[in-house]
Image (cartoon, rainbow, N blue to C red):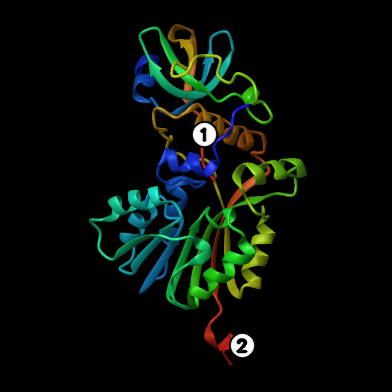
């Protein structure tokens, strides 16, 4: 399955994306187009003690865009609720 | 500074099924073990009603579900309306409207941990028949959890207390349960969760905070399944 197809089928799901340059992105898939997948990041910098500044510099509703061509692996992020 | 939404608001707004550790697999683990010939079963914090639906296939008992959230109650009602002998009600665990020794089985899937246990467990126990069972699927801290993390989590999740496995066991024994079965349960769910579109920034922030806590303290927080039987009448000295 192409990364594009995977992303289309899994909108709303938390994933871990590793790009060819070794960068790791964790977040919830919000949307996808032919060139990019957009995620709402789950990011430690905004985590514990990290709030209080201009949260989500990506623009609301868009999320962080990751080029599909840059993706090495994409997998579901283990998740649960208490 | 952003006002973070509460974890409870997040769970309510997500409205997803099995919002407890281990998800559906954890529910199925105990559902298959419930005793036969039950008359009345109560699930506290029934959420969207998925566990009630699972129970329906397993027992002919009358099933009662309560939840403190009106939104969850209406979801659970809609989901179970086609099933027989199920009643879902908006009730708070702290002022339950059932009679003494009414239930054969009471279930809490990650609900009791969010309540003042010293107050709520005796109330639930009072509703159980002698030899009735309680099933708890609950969070337990290990001794390695840093104190500061525990304090932060109490604030974030609004936990009145955070118990260890031993603390849970003591609570059960002190409340007159015997033959307590304990099993560690995998927290993470096998099936990927699907979150709704259009979560507000507040909600995403709360979701992220939740994720960060559980990534950072993954090895210090566990989930246990407790199945405990209330002592029978012959041992119940309060009734002599």
Residue drawn 75% across and 45% down? B144
| Secondary structure at numbered mark 2 | helix
User: Mark 1, chain letter?
Assistant: A
Please state if A32 lies on the left or on the right of B163 as rendered.
left
- How packed is label 1: few (under 14 Cα within 10 Å), some, or many (20 or more)? some
Please state if B98 lies on the left or on the right of B180 as rendered.
left
**Which sits in the foreground, A38 or A5?**
A38
Residue drawn 50% across and 46% down? B22
If the image is split into quadrants, where does the C terminus of chain B sit? bottom right
Residue drawn 53% across and 53% down? B110
Q: Position of residue B109 (x, y in %)?
A: 49, 55
Q: Mark 2 points at which residue?
A: B237
Q: Name the residue under label 1.
A: A78
B237 up-or-down from A50: above or below: below
| Secondary structure at numbered mark 1 | loop
Q: Where is residue B140 in the image (x, y as percent from the top left)?
A: 64, 52
Q: Position of residue B49 (x, y in %)?
A: 37, 52
User: Mark 2, chain letter?
Assistant: B
Label 1 vs label 2: CA separation? 48 Å
Which residue is the extreme one toward the left? B82
Residue drawn 29% across and 50% down? B79
């Amino acid at each position: 399955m192409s990364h594009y197809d995977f992303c289309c089928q899994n909108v709303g799901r938390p994933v871990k994306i590793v790009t060819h340059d070794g960068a790791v992105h964790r977040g919830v898939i919000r949307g996808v187009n032919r060139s990019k997948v957009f995620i709402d990041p789950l990011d430690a910098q905004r985590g514990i003690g990290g709030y209080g500044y201009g949260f989500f510099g990506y623009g609301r509703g868009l999320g962080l865009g990751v080029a599909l061509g840059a993706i090495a692996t994409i997998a579901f992020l283990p998740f649960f609720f208490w | 500074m952003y006002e973070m939404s509460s974890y409870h608001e997040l769970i309510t707004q997500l409205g997803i099924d099995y919002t407890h550790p281990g998800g559906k697999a954890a529910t199925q683990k105990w559902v298959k073990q419930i005793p036969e010939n039950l008359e009345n079963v109560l699930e506290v914090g029934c959420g969207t009603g998925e566990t009630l639906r699972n129970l329906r296939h397993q027992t002919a008992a009358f099933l009662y579900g309560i939840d403190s959230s009106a939104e969850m109650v209406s979801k659970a009602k809609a989901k179970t309306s086609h099933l027989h002998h199920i009643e879902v009600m908006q009730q708070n665990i702290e002022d339950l409207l059932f009679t003494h020794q009414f239930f054969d089985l009471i279930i809490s899937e990650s609900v009791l941990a969010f309540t003042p246990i010293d107050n709520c467990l005796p109330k639930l126990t009072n509703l159980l028949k002698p030899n009735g069972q309680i099933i708890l699927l609950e969070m337990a801290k290990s001794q390695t959890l840093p104190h500061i993390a525990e304090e932060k989590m109490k604030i974030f999740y609004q936990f009145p207390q955070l118990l260890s496995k031993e603390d849970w066991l003591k609570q059960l024994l002190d409340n007159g349960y015997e033959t307590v079965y304990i099993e560690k349960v995998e927290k993470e769910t096998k099936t990927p969760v699907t979150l709704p579109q259009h979560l507000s920034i507040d909600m995403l922030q709360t979701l992220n905070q939740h994720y960060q806590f559980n990534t950072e303290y993954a090895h210090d927080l566990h989930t246990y399944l407790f199945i405990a039987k209330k002592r029978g009448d012959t041992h119940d000295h309060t009734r002599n």
